């Protein structure tokens, strides 16, 4: 296809897309009820607003947090257990506790998953066929497991609210939170998991969980009511909730602020400003994978080296799947339960000089003698072993060692972001939110490190604040956003987005090897692989605008047009083959008629957390809403 725009503004000779006001935005309409799911790496929480009309002013919104287990806990671990038939047995603490009580011979038949969201963060090329290993060593599709967690939460939610004036699932709009640093593939994975869980269509029913062996996951045949599900960026949601707190306090001195969302798996930064009561994103979100669980992984590595088996490689290398499953489970219990308890105590800065990690019975049986020997040889106070090898006593300075790499990574991320975006002189405040953001020791160390970086040159220190229940700021803010999307007026493009096209070849300007003959006129040549830009990185986007450009076929007889979308982390992209350019998605569009004068209009919408594209064949006047498939495996 060829660009049909006459206005050339890009260096490669291709016209940039035109900004146009949106005609209609289904996400700006007001639903009857809203339910928000904060699907975190380590924990889940849910908030609801069952009667949106009863809350006409979103600024005074007070979301209801729902109970997620029989003990009425509002926040539970993001884990799930399936029995030998693939039926869901439960999620959260109850799933973890039931799995721990299973007998040695029964356990391998059960599939237990924890921290599944990390898989999306680790794999940039994640697709529908990406597999995840359960504790029993068997492989399952990651998207299936995520969909089952969402489905289980949905069923619990509907049961919880059925007596609270709730009428029908069809009246509910759903919001699921995602990290800001996720690429399009990760967001698409969560959306499709939501479809599979029946969040948008009450007639969709999930079957039992099956092993992934010999199967391929097909894409969804069609999307029913996609507007019923929206994805909310975690730091942006938290920023909206923090703005609410600023408004409540009637603070006029906070114009530019950072929201640092420290979760279990990721750390996300949102940079926002307040103008006329509305939020504007001042810089694209930044982040890394230095969430709270990295401290647990640091301890895990220390423990494995302590027993002389780095990574527990030998310990897990046993042929018996029953024994292997039990060993993996035991180590996880030590790292994510026993050590986690001590990590929280230390993080809350309780006055303790030592922190005791208790080993499981099986670990004591396997390594008790070795631990006893270690106890005799240790002559320092940082690490002590009980005489029977059942416990490890860690000093305060040792806990500091475990925290230090994570704190250093987060501190560098924040300081680099402030400098790179030129925020140092204008920044007014930093908000800490997220489960890990509630850690007092983390906050004090980060605040000290950041102020040390900028105090000398600016002669000032940044005010920092942590809202009450920082771990729930995201789920509350996401609901407030869906209730009133207009609270966000502007965003910053996180990348340069464009589409592949051809332009008339200009000798001396375009690459000679990209020259191709015109099928209808051999005397004319085209330059292929041109990057036709919609929007450039760091460019401001008003949330009521879309980007529009037109293309024409390369030959008179052409019946289809292939649209291939790309992104890059730098502006002024010439070719789709340039270094750092990544293919996002591909679609094929039917075009009517004959000849060159057949315009196809492409509307590119990046104002939401996902990219939406509409294509209109001007000859037939047919307009198509086309869902870009970011998970196709040919990438």
Image: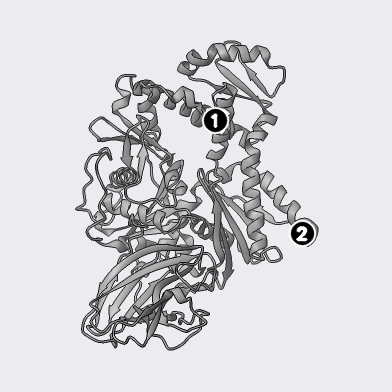
Q: Nearer the viewer, residue 5 or 543?
A: 5
Mark 2 or mark 1, earlier in chain: 1
Q: Secondary structure at mark 2?
A: loop
Q: Is residue 604 left or right of residue 291?
A: left
**Residue 544 visible, this orientation:** no
Residue 458 coordinates in the image, percent (x, y): 77, 61
x and y percent of residue 309 in the render?
54, 24
Outermost residue toward the left in this view: 203
Q: Judge from the rendering whether residue 585 lies leftward or rightward of residue 497; answer left or right.
A: left
Mark 2 is surrounded, within 10 Å at the Cα level, by few (under 14), some (14 to 19) or many (20 or more) other residues, namely: few
- Could you tell me residue 223's position as x and y percent? 25, 61
- Residue in the image at 44% along x and 60% along y: 480
Residue 460 - label: 2
- State the count of labels: 2
Q: Secondary structure at mark 1?
A: helix
Residue drawn at the location 35% of the way across and 31% of the way down: 137
Per the image, the residue denoted by label 1 is 300
The residue that appears at 27% across and 57% down in the rendered structure is: 200
**How much space separates mark 2 and mark 1, taking CA atoms?**
39 Å
**In-front residue for pair 518/368:** 518
Above or below: residue 611 compared with residue 391:
below
Picture quadrant of residue 374: top right
Q: Could you tell me which quadrant the N terminus lies in? A: bottom left
Any part of residue 356 in sight: yes
Q: Nearer the viewer, residue 349 or 531?
A: 531
Using the image, determine if residue 599 lies above or below residue 54: below
Where in the figure is residue 569, as x and y percent of width and height? 52, 64
Instruction: Please name which of the two marks, 2 or 1, marks the residue nearer to the observer.
Output: 1
Q: Residue at x 55, y 15 (%)?
A: 390
Do callouts 2 and 1 mark residues in contact (Cβ within 8 Å)?
no
């Amino acid at each position: 296809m060829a660009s049909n725009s006459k206005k050339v503004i890009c260096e490669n000779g291709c016209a940039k897309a035109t900004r146009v006001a949106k005609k209609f935005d289904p996400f700006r309409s007001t639903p009857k009820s809203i339910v928000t799911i904060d699907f975190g790496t380590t924990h889940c929480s849910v908030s609801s607003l069952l009667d949106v009309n009863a809350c006409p002013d979103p600024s005074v919104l007070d979301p209801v947090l729902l109970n997620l287990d029989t003990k009425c806990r509002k926040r539970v671990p993001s884990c799930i257990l399936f029995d030998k038939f693939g039926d869901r047995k439960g999620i959260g603490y109850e799933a973890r506790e039931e799995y721990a009580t299973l007998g040695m011979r029964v356990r391998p038949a059960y599939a237990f998953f924890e921290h599944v969201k990390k898989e999306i963060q680790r794999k940039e090329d994640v697709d529908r066929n990406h597999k995840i290993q359960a504790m029993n060593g068997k492989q399952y599709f990651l998207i299936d497991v995520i969909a089952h967690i969402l489905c289980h939460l949905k069923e619990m939610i509907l049961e919880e609210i059925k007596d609270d004036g709730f009428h029908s699932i069809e009246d509910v709009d759903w919001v699921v939170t995602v990290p800001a640093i996720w690429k399009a593939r990760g967001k698409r994975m969560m959306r499709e998991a939501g479809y599979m869980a029946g969040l948008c269509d009450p007639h969709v029913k999930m079957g039992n969980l099956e092993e992934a062996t010999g199967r391929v996951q097909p894409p969804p045949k069609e999307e029913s009511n996609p507007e019923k599900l929206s994805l909310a960026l975690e730091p942006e949601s938290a920023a909206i909730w923090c703005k609410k707190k600023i408004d409540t306090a009637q603070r006029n001195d906070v114009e530019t602020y950072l929201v640092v969302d420290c979760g279990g798996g990721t750390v996300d930064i949102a940079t926002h400003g307040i103008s006329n009561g509305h939020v504007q994103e001042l810089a694209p979100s930044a982040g890394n994978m230095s969430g709270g669980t990295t401290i647990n992984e640091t301890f895990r590595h220390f423990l494995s080296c302590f027993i002389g088996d780095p990574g527990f490689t030998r310990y897990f290398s046993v042929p018996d799947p029953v024994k292997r499953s039990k060993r993996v489970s035991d180590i996880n219990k030590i790292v994510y339960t026993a050590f986690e308890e001590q990590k929280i105590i230390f993080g809350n800065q309780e006055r303790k000089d030592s922190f005791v990690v208790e080993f499981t019975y099986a670990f004591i049986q396997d390594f008790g003698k070795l631990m006893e020997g270690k106890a005799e040889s240790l002559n320092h106070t940082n690490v002590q072993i009980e005489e029977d090898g059942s416990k490890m006593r860690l000093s305060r300075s040792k806990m500091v060692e475990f925290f230090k790499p994570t704190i250093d990574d987060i501190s560098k991320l924040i300081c680099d972001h402030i400098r790179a975006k030129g925020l140092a002189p204008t920044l007014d405040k930093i908000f800490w939110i997220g489960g890990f953001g509630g850690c007092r020791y983390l906050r004090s160390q980060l605040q000290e490190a950041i102020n040390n970086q900028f105090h000398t040159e600016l002669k000032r220190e940044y005010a920092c604040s942590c809202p009450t229940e920082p771990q729930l700021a995201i789920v509350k803010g996401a609901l407030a956003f869906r209730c009133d999307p207009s609270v966000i007026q502007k965003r910053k493009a996180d990348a340069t987005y464009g589409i592949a096209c051809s332009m008339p070849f200009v000798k001396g300007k375009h690459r000679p090897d990209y020259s191709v003959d015109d099928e209808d006129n051999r005397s004319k040549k085209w330059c292929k692989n041109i990057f036709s830009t919609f929007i450039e990185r760091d460019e401001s986007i008003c949330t009521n605008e879309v980007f529009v450009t037109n293309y024409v076929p390369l030959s008179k007889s052409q019946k289809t047009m292939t649209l291939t979308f790309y992104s890059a982390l730098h502006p002024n992209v010439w070719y789709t083959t340039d270094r750092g350019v990544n293919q996002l998605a591909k679609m094929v569009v039917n075009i009517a008629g004959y000849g060159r004068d057949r315009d196809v209009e492409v509307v590119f919408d990046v104002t939401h957390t996902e990219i939406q594209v509409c294509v209109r064949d001007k000859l037939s006047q047919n307009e198509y809403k086309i869902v870009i498939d970011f998970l196709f495996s040919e990438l």
